[in-house]
Image: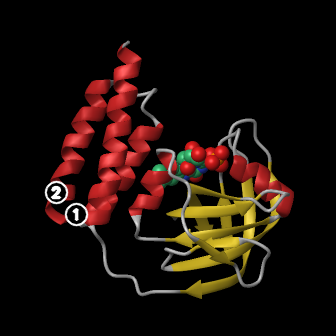
Amino acid sequence: MIQETIVTTQDAEGNTHIAPMGIHVAGDEYIILPFKPSITLDNILATKTAVINYTDDVRVFAGCLTGRRDWPLERAEKIDAYALSASLAHCEVKLTHTEDDPVRPQLFCTAVHQVNHAPFKGYNRAQFSVLEAAILLSRVTRLSAAKINTELEYLHIGFNKTAGPNEREAWEWITRAIEQKLRESVN
Ligand SMILES: Cc1cc2nc3c(=O)[nH]c(=O)nc-3n(C[C@H](O)[C@H](O)[C@H](O)COP(=O)(O)O)c2cc1C
């Protein structure tokens, strides 16, 4: 199973980096799969730690893909790292081993501490739509404008019926960035 999460990592100087990552969960093992090059990859190799944050604030996903990476953080409890303040839960992990790959290495991690901060409030179609739109943004150079627009039109149906203010803000960031990239690719 893959969980869409926010991974927080630190570089050797203690600067925190925030990035959306799909984490493979297999029993007690968490596998982080960053595409090279990746700051997340460099940081985990340097510190051997990471925090996997579970959040329903999709602005963090949309923000990280549109240059808004400055989200409130708080100290992790068992490792020298920071967790996302907006998370419903977080998991502090240590790197156990890696399987290197020229494109997408696998970072095998194990949980050292898990914390619940707030209850899960149920599924929301607008949050799903924002995550899918964020994925489209990350692939915008590899997909046709027609395909992107068709997918956005479909995602907008569920989005429009269920979005709250956070989802609307996130959707605007993503769709504006997609429009800009599509304009740039035409010129
Ligand atoms: C929902 C979602 C899941 C993502 N999953 C991954 C992933 O598993 N691996 C990856 O390299 N990038 C993933 N990305 C894209 C990264 O977040 C983005 O490219 C980021 O900048 C990674 O590079 P960095 O570690 O240098 O920040 C995902 C983006 C979204 C919106």
Q: Disc 2 and disc 1: Cα gap in Å?
A: 6 Å
Query: In the rendered view of the protein, which quadrant contains the C terminus?
Result: top left
The residue drawn where x is 30% and y is 61% is: 167
**Left or right of 153: which side holds 88?**
right
Visible in this render: residue 26? Answer: no
The residue drawn where x is 22% and y is 63% is: 163
Question: Circle 2 sits in a helix, a strand or a loop, which is it?
Answer: helix
Residue denoted by label 2: 160
Above/below status of 75 relative to 97: below
Above/below status of 115 relative to 158: below
Q: Which amino acid type is shown beneath numbered disc 1?
A: Ala
Q: Residues within 10 Å of mark 2 (few under 14, many from 20)?
A: some
Q: Quadrant of residue 97?
A: bottom right
Q: Quadrant of residue 36?
A: top right
Residue denoted by label 1: 163
Question: Circle 1 sits in a helix, a strand or a loop, which is it?
Answer: loop
Visible in this render: residue 163? Answer: yes
Q: Which amino acid type is shown beneath numbered disc 2?
A: Asn
Q: Residues within 10 Å of mark 1 (few under 14, many from 20)?
A: some
Residue 137, given in percent of the width and then of the height, sits at 41, 39
The residue drawn where x is 55% and y is 54% is: 69
Say whether mark 2 is within 8 Å of ligand 1.
Answer: no
The residue drawn where x is 67% and y is 70% is: 51
Q: Which mark is residue 121?
A: none
Query: Decide: marks 2, 1 in contact (CB < 8 A)?
Result: yes
